[in-house]
Image (tube, rainbow, N blue to C red):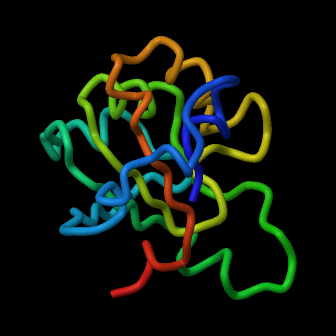
Amino acid sequence: MDGPVHFIHGAAGLDEMPLNATMGEARVIEIEHPREITADEIGKHRLQAGERVLFRTSNSARCWHTDSFVEDFVGLSEQAAMYLAETGVQTVGIDYLSVGGYHANGPGSTRSCSRRGSGSSRDLTCLQSPAAGTR
């Protein structure tokens, strides 16, 4: 799990996050894009403020079946991260080790989106776990 401090200097850490951000119902959304989670793809799901969202991507089938770290895993695009922050989604989970991409210019440029997002992005909790890829 990551608190906003993982992406934003001076933001809240996990010790300051509400426990209920990680407990309760969550919506699992299957992502078809092979390289990133896009705002266009998740926008059609009409997410609501306060929701917990788990993304199931191609990471589930591809990244957990090797002993090596997979650098080109599917992560959030900057636009998708901005969309989630502006919508007020409470918790985001993904089926690999980070919601953000490994490479600076790749998917997952969540730092800039979180700074520009609504106040609700301060309370956004990120989950990175194979649990997002389980049935």
Nearer to me, 107 or 7:
7
Vertical position of residue 101 compared to residue 104: above or below: below
Residue at position x 44%, y 59% in the image: 93
Q: Position of residue 22 (x, y in %)?
A: 36, 62
Nearer to me, 130 or 25:
25
Quadrant (top left, top right, bottom left, bottom right) of the C terminus: bottom left
Q: Position of residue 78 (x, y in %)?
A: 53, 27
Question: Number of numbered discs present?
Answer: 0
Residue at position x 20%, y 43% in the image: 50
Residue at position x 26%, y 32% in the image: 88
Q: Position of residue 36 (x, y in %)?
A: 53, 46
Nearer to me, 32 or 110:
110
Residue at position x 62%, y 30% in the image: 109
Instruction: Locate residue 2 relative to residue 42 in the image: left or right.
Output: right
Residue at the outermost right position: 68
Q: Position of residue 62 (x, y in %)?
A: 63, 77
Quadrant (top left, top right, bottom left, bottom right) of the N terminus: bottom right
Vertical position of residue 19 compared to residue 123: above or below: below
Residue at the outermost front position: 15
